[in-house]
Image (cartoon, helix red, strand yellow):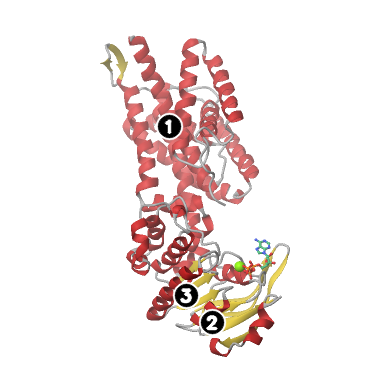
Amino acid sequence: MLEIQELHAGYGGGEVLRGLSLGVAHGEIVALLGRNGMGKTTLLRCIMGLLPHAAGSIRLEGQPLSGLDCFEIARRGVAYVPQGREIFGQLTVEENLRLAALRGGTIETGYDLFPGLRARAKDPGGSLSGGQQQQLAIARAMVAKPRLLLLDEPSEGIQPSVVNEIADIVTRSVRSMGLSVLLVEQNTDLALRVADRAVFVDHGVDAASIASRAVTREILASYMEL
Amino acid sequence: MDRILIFLLDSSNAILVLMLVSLGLAVIFGLMNVINMAHGEFLVLGAYGVLTLQWAGLPFAACLVIAPMLVALIGLAAEELLIRRTYERLLDTILATWGLSLVLRQGLVLIYGPGSHAVAAPDMGSVPVFGEIYPVYRLVVMALSAAAIAFTFWVFFRTALGLQARAVIANRNMAACLGINTRMLDRLTFAFGAGLAGLAGAVMSPLISVDPNAGLGWLVPGFLSILVAGLGSLSGPIVGAAGVGAVDSLAAAISSPVWAQLTVFVAAIIVIRFFPQGLMALKRREA
Ligand SMILES: Nc1ncnc2c1ncn2[C@@H]1O[C@H](COP(=O)(O)OP(=O)(O)OP(=O)(O)O)[C@@H](O)[C@H]1O
Ligand SMILES: [Mg+2]
């Protein structure tokens, strides 16, 4: 459902993605793994239309996304949970969810996913704990009824016990809805547990694509260790 | 005693209109980071709009409704043709809107001549207020200004459109990631801010001398209002305008309008010197 071919992109200074190719099938969860600074966030920003790409193509269900504005890509069913969550700290929890529900979703989807958010509905998003903010960011993405979910380091800065609980809830929900997911995650154990397949990124290219079950310690070491 | 009450009424009048002006400035700055130097001219355009529509034979009430809408349309065109090309470059927005203000001013001179015009005041008579006779129209100006301010707050805090605008103010990229058309909101907000200035000019038109250079006298106190209270919230300009307007009215009553302006300037400089974030010291917008 998502096909990326030979993508080149970067920031003023230099190229970060150097011909990266990647696909995500319907209902598939793909983990995008790689060392810090290899261009994982950059790739998600390209898919979302937040960063233009210099060459290559991004297609969603066969339709090219190149040249579309970020809001148009969102309306085609791509939802983004960015690194650092980026919830609206001054808006209430409910307002955060309502923003995502403006185009045909319902905020109840979010509360059903994480019932704990309901009690904080009238509180500013910024007053939530780190784990709850991540729940809110994920709930906000799910409220928009996406076809493709982009998750950037959802476990970052959250207690391990909470991480596993959130991961289980999200995985169950994603599987039952048949969503496609592209997951960037430093916690490789977690990533390989929930994902069908892992794509390793090295210096801006896709270095390997391996079924999660087949990923060995040696493979991990060769792509993840410095 | 009665003199004091009348003075208070007159001051409230000036303060409410100043609130409209600074609210328009703040809305545009908040969403787009554009410092709109042409805001005073938008106000003047509102007054000229009433003048022209009155010449065309429309009743005053209709002029009051249509003139601000025309100014909003002019704002929309200015945003599309000029302002949007300068986003994210604060200095360029100042230069571009300053250039726009010059063009608008000269345009008015070309069409209406450099002299001043008077808008025929609607004949509403006077009513006794606290034992003094007070013109009804001035009460209408207050009511309309207060209603427009309330409407602005309602739009921003009670409607889906306002929610989206607040999201864009807080984090433009993330708002876009939720499917919000930020360009559309820019257009609407700029037109809305211009319309508020146009409304201020339209309601004030019978009370001021309508000339091409009348804008500056509003732009400066409008800016001082938002600087004094601090940027980044809608209540800032309201509080700031109350302070600036009050100091101005008080000083004008004691001495002369010229001294009043000087007093406002000095007071504002002192406030900004000691509270660079503004009196409300509100947190600046994220990212
Ligand atoms: N806004 C930016 N401007 C310039 N360079 C940037 C910008 N953002 C990222 N980079 C650079 O691009 C490269 C890739 O960054 P990116 O954030 O995509 O990496 P990442 O794989 O997500 O890393 P991490 O695991 O640390 O999140 C890095 O070298 C980074 O310094
Ligand atoms: Mg990253």
User: Which type of secondary structure does the marked residue at label 3 adopt?
Assistant: strand
Q: Quadrant of ligand 1?
A: bottom right
Mark 3 or 2: the one toward you? 2
- Horizontal side of B255 relative to B98 (left or right) equals left
Q: Are marks 1 and 3 on the same chain?
A: no
Task: Name above or below for residue A88 compared with residue A155.
Answer: above
For residue B122, say whether it is visible: no
Seen at 55% across and 69% down, the residue is A153
Quadrant of the image occupied by residue A18: bottom right
> What chain is tagged by disc 3?
A
User: Which type of secondary structure does the marked residue at label 2 adopt?
Assistant: helix
Furthest-bottom residue in view? A214
Residue highlighted by disc 1: B200
Label 3 vs label 2: CA separation?
19 Å
Does ligand 1 reach within 8 Å of label 1's beta carbon? no
Mark 2 or 1: the one toward you? 2
Mark 1 or 3: the one toward you? 3
> What chain is tagged by disc 2?
A
Placement of the N terminus of chain B among the 4 image quadrants: top left
Q: In the rendering, at what x and y percent does residue B202 appear?
A: 41, 31
Q: Identify which residue, B28 or A29, lies in the foreground.
A: A29
Q: Are marks 3 and 2 on the same chain?
A: yes
User: Which type of secondary structure does the marked residue at label 1 adopt?
Assistant: helix
Q: Amino acid at mark 2?
A: Leu
Residue highlighted by disc 3: A148
Q: In the rendering, at what x and y percent does residue B37 appear?
A: 57, 36
Residue highlighted by disc 2: A192
